[in-house]
Structures are given as C-alpha cells and as structure tokens.
Image (cartoon, helix red, strand yellow):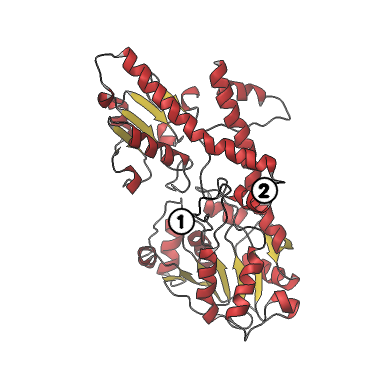
Amino acid sequence: MPFETISVIGLGYIGLPTAAMFASRKKKVIGVDVNQHAVDTINQGKIHIVEPDLDMIVHAAVSEGYLKAVTTPEPADAFLIAVPTPFKDNGAEIPEPDLTYIKAATKAIAPVLKKGDLVILESTSPVGATEQMAEWLSKLRADLSFPLTHGENADVNVSHCPERVLPGHVVRELVENDRVIGGISSKCSERSVELYKTFVQGECVITNARTAEMAKLTENSSRDVQIAFANELSIICDKLDINVWELIALANRHPRVNILQPGPGVGGHCIAVDPWFIVSKNPKEARVIHTARTVNDSKPEWVINKVKLAIADFLQSNPEKTVCEVTIACYGLAFKKNIDDLRESPALNITSEVCAFHSGQVLIVEPNIHKLPNTLQSGFLVEFENAIELADINLILVDHDEFKFSNLIRKNTIDTKGICNE
C-alpha cells in the first residue's frame, strides 16, 4: 500500500526537518504539534527553530501545498511520532524515563487510524517503549489488530526508527545517514524501509524494535563515556598544571587513540539523557555508563568553582574593587556550537548558577538567540564586542564560530572549550 499522506507528530528539532524532507519529495505531509505558535509559523512558510537550510525547504513545501501544520491529527497512511522523552520529576537518584508525551501522541492518533496504516516511533526511548505504544494503541482501537498479537497479519504496522542526526547538519544527515529500522514484525520493518526510502539515501538496516531502541541508546552512551574520560582528564590536568588541550593533541597522534575534547559538561536531548534509559533499567549492570553520567553531570559544578576562584583572585589583585563591581561575561548558552538549542545545556545551567550567586553584573553572549530564558532574567544579553570590552572575567562555555579567531582577552579567562588554545 503506497504512502500518499504522511503525518509527523511533534514539529521540533527532529519532527519538522523530517516532515520537510518528505514534503520536498512531493508527499502530502500533515505536521501535528500542540504548540499553536509553531503551527502558525510553519503555515506561514517559516520555521521556529534554527537549522541551516531548513527554512528554504519548509517555505517551498508550504508554498507548493505539500506541507501543512495542525494541532489535531488527521487521517494519514503513516504516522511518525517525534515527541520528547524527558525524565520523571520524582527526585529519584537514577532518573526514570517519562513516556507521557509518547502516550499522549498515541492517544491523539488513535481515533484516525485505519487498516493498512504504519506507526513509527522516532522518539529516543527506553527498551520496550515501541511495544508499549503498540499495546496502548490496541486498547484504544480494539476494532483493529496490531503486530504484538497478529504479527504479519496485523491491520496496523508498528516500528521504531530512532533519529541519529547532528543539530546544525540535520537536513544533510537525514538524507545521507544510515537508518536503523526496528519493526515489531518483518512486515512492519519492510513497510518502514519503503517509507524512509522516499528520501533516505543511506542504508536502511533492519532489526527488531528492541534492538533498534537499544542501538540509539548505545550510540549516545558510548559518546558519553568518551566525553567523561576527556572531562576527567581536564580536571586532573588542571590540578597538575598541564594544558589538557595540548595533552590530548599529543595523545591523539597515536594511530589507535582518538580522545574527544572536554567541555563544561554534556548537554542536548540525547547524550545527556539516553544513558539514563539504560541505567534506569539495569542499575547493577550499567556501572561504566552510570559512572560516566556522574562524571559529566558533576563537571558544571567544577566550572562554577573555577569562576568563584577567579572572582577571589581578581579581587585580590584589585583590592579597590568590591564583588559587586566585578563583571563576568559568559560566552554561549546552547548545548553545542552554532545552534540555538538550549535543551539540557550545561552552559545554560552554569550561567544560571553564576547569575544566582554573583552580586555583580553578568553579561551573556549567545549569537543564536534574541531573548534570554526566564532563568536568566538577572543577566544581560549583549553583543560579543560589548562583553569583551566590559568583562573583568571571561567564561567560555560554547565554541561558537563567532567566538573563534577573535581578540578575546585571554587574561582572567576560564576556557572550558579550548578556544584560547587554538
């Protein structure tokens, strides 16, 4: 059965680019989001996020009538769910995955499902989430059969296909990257491959739903462990008065060594989150993964302590000044360079902490946003040049291109990204 109409539930950093790619191939695409502002913006042919080249694709797709956004799902042949999977806010020592958004999306599409439809969960999820989604659907639509009970003969097919793209390169990587396709049945996988081949040039590799879920978690947990090693090295080198950036460059000259770069922590909607999905279900076995999370989650506190020491050193060198007269400039809020995404950003959290404890002025430089989030209302969003001129202490948190190869004053600078070492 051909896929004439495709619905994407969740029009964020993954859902909107995915919807746009299908629409660019002349497929009718219905994007669904609960955010009325996002829906209105997209229907004007504009985008509400920052992602290179996406604005042109969305504008063309909307103008040509292939893409529209709505707040309530409509009938389609395939439904792709790309909603967040945060943690439960229950204060648990090990964060637990919260499937509330997936369940809400499932409930929203259930009334418009029909025989022959395909439902794909793209949201990064704990192992078993796709089967859980299929079970929810089967209870909501008892008149239809699903692959958990009817296998190849199910009325509705269900798969998991995790996104695996890099913010800032999403448009290109959606097309070029290989995709892991995990159907609950073989037919589910085959139909999912048929759908993605609408625009995917990379290989679509078939497995089962649980392995597909675990593959995404494994990819990001692996990177989290590697970053933790680099972050731990940076702390050790600071105590030993060794330039960690030079050290890593030297070590990486070994043909079988590839150490990543340290930073102020780990952020984003994947690497800082996905390892906990493994740890929460396997707390006794996931010892290395758990330790890496602990190392990376503790790095922001180390950075904050470095700021406090820098303030003390500055006041000792300038006894005529009080702490209220010390101006700190924080460079970058996004969780990685050259994007506007603040989700799970250690830079944002560190800056918020600095604003909370410092009684002097805090200048904030983030070239990819136009308004500070509510947690930073005591700070001042300024241009790069203004911060350079006014700051007594410089705190580099993100290596945006705008911050590189500049005349950044290196005196009284805490450089968590190695920009001053370039």
Q: Are marks 2 and 1 in contact (CB under 8 Å)?
A: no
Quadrant of residue 199 in the image? Answer: bottom right
**Can the viewer see residue 279 in this picture?**
yes
Residue at (48% x, 35% y) in the render: 300
Q: Residues within 10 Å of mark 2 (few under 14, many from 20)?
A: few
Q: Residues within 10 Å of mark 1 (few under 14, many from 20)?
A: many
Residue at (60% x, 53% y) in the render: 164
Residue at (55% x, 31% y) in the render: 262
| Closer to the camera in the image, 193 or 39 | 39
Quadrant of residue 33 in the image? Answer: bottom left
In the shown orientation, is residue 131 left or right of residue 26? right
In the shown orientation, is residue 186 left or right of residue 202? right
The location of residue 399, given as percent across then percent down, is 46, 34
Residue 160 in the image: above or below residue 287? below
Mark 1 residue type: Leu
Q: Secondary structure at mark 2?
A: loop
| Numbered circles on residues, count | 2
Residue 146 in the image: above or below residue 98? below
Q: Which residue is mark 2?
A: 283
| Closer to the camera in the image, 294 or 46 | 294
**Can the viewer see residue 25 in this picture?**
no
The location of residue 58, given as percent across then percent down, is 44, 62
Q: Secondary structure at mark 1?
A: helix
Of the two numbered discs 2 and 1 in the rendering, the one whose residue sits closer to the viewer: 2
For marks 2 and 1, give the CA distance. Answer: 40 Å
Residue at (49% x, 63% y) in the render: 20
Circle nearer the N terminus (2, 1) = 1
Mark 2 residue type: Pro
Circle number at residue 54: 1
Residue 111 in the image: above or below residue 400? below
Quadrant of residue 292 in the image? Answer: top right
